[in-house]
Amino acid sequence: LTKTATYRDTNGNGVADIGDHIDYAFTVENAGNVTLSNLTVSDPLVSVSGGPLATLAPGASDSSTFSASYPLTQADIDAGVVLNEASVSGSGPDGTSLSASSGDVSVTIERKPEAEFIKSAMLNDANGNGLADAGETISYSFTARNTGNVTLTDLTVSDPPVLVSGGPLASLEP
């Protein structure tokens, strides 16, 4: 069994996102000298469509019967890789069971950690005259936005002229 994977950018934005897909194709080859029957492909990660393959002659292969598609999750993108293997099972002419594995197939997911921070200021006009007077203060607020495709962790804000309170932000999803 040979398993191949193709990454598909579902929304065409050029960045790995939740819901993009990995399409899997499976090639079953009879490397023996007897006809095999009732061949099925299973994969713990995806539901494989197609099959069972009724028979496969010695030396023959089939790459059009079985396929699968896997939607990416945020955990996959954060990990930067999707790794798994599939297996094929069937019977020999005398009813003997057989199975084979594809071996691990790895798809690397491009990770793009990016963040945007916005600082806002508001004058605390204690005397209400609409002007900044000596002794009045300015309150600052900070907004963090994850503009990348991976979950960011332990975000802190520092601003040398002022004492920043709060944080760190444990995690921030895209």
Image: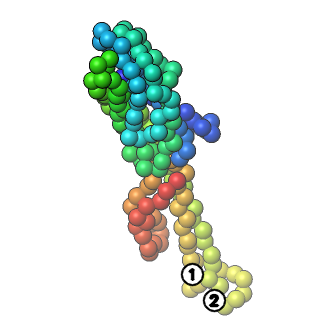
Q: Is residue 169 above or below residue 33?
A: below
Q: Residue furthest bottom?
A: 127
Q: Earlier in the sequence, mark 2 or mark 1?
A: 2
Compared with 88, 131 (above or below) is: below
According to the image, label 1 marks what residue?
137
Of 156 and 4, nearer the camera is 4
Residue 171 picture quarter: bottom left
Of residue 95 and residue 15, the one placed in the foreground of this image is 95
**Marks 2/1: CA–CA distance:** 8 Å
| Image coordinates for residue 18, horizontal then vertical, percent | 53, 47
Vertical order, 145 against 134 (above or below): above
Q: How many C-alpha atoms fall within 10 Å of the one at disc 2: few (<14), some, or many (≥20)?
A: few
Mark 1 residue type:
Thr
In the rendered structure, the answer to whether residue 128 lies left or right of residue 22 reads: right
Q: Quadrant of the N terminus?
A: top left
**Can see residue 100?**
no
Q: Which mark is residue 126?
A: 2
Q: Position of residue 6 (x, y in %)?
A: 49, 28
For the point 54% across and 67% down, the residue is 142
